[in-house]
Amino acid sequence: MQNALRTIVRGVDWVNWLVGWLLAAMIMVMSVLISWQVFARYVMGNSLSFSEEVSRFSMVWMAMLGAAYAYRYGSLIAVDLLTIMSGPVLSRVLRLTVAIASCIFAYVLLTQGWAITERVASQTAPSTRVSMGWLYASMPAGAALILVNAIGIVAADFAGEEVTR
């Protein structure tokens, strides 16, 4: 059983490794586009038509995937007074309760995010002419990653592993 749980944790950590590189690539693209936009507007006198929109799409994707990524490593803002003051048993129960609540939240976000993504898929963005479904797909993608990370947190807790970065 311990080996199966450790395999799940390694799989979740591998997914998060990929997401971390994707986040780094998105922030690089966003930084380059914004820098070029400023240069083009103020030095060349002619701005790009698509850079602001692509940067905005990247920011939304980074927020959704980044929040799920940070959840896995305990990097989100938290009030941990109860877990600090409680014993090991109550602390574990609280961690599992938070993980279950996160799964419920992620499930609702996944189903409702998918529904809204389908509704807006026929609309296109003004500058890039890309389907708005790509923007709204960040919601179910982030929710799916939250679910995967919640499973990883529970598996790591039952396997007795510490969350490492």
Image: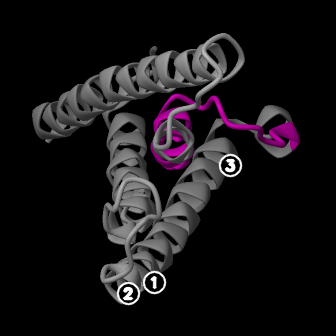
Magenta range is: 57-81
Q: Which mark is residue 90?
A: 3
Dot 1 falls on a residue whose secondary structure is: helix
Which amino acid type is marked by label 3? Leu
Tell me the SS state at disc 2. helix
Magenta segment, principal secondary structure? helix
> To which residue does mark 1 refer?
112
Q: Are marks 2 and 1 in contact (CB under 8 Å)?
A: yes
Residue 96 spot, x, y in % from top left:
53, 55
The numbered mark, 3 or 1, whose residue comes first in the sequence reads 3
x and y, in percent, of residue 110 in the image: 40, 73
Please report the residue visible at 12 percent of the width from the left and 31 percent of the height from the top: 3
Would you say 164 lies left or right of 40 here?
left
Q: Which residue is mark 2?
A: 115
Q: Is residue 96 left or right of residue 43?
A: left
Amino acid on which disc 1 is placed: Gln
Residue 1 or 144: which is nearer the viewer?
144
The x, y position of residue 82, in whole percent, is 83, 45
Screen quadrant of the N terminus: top left
Q: Identify the residue at the far front of this view.
A: 45
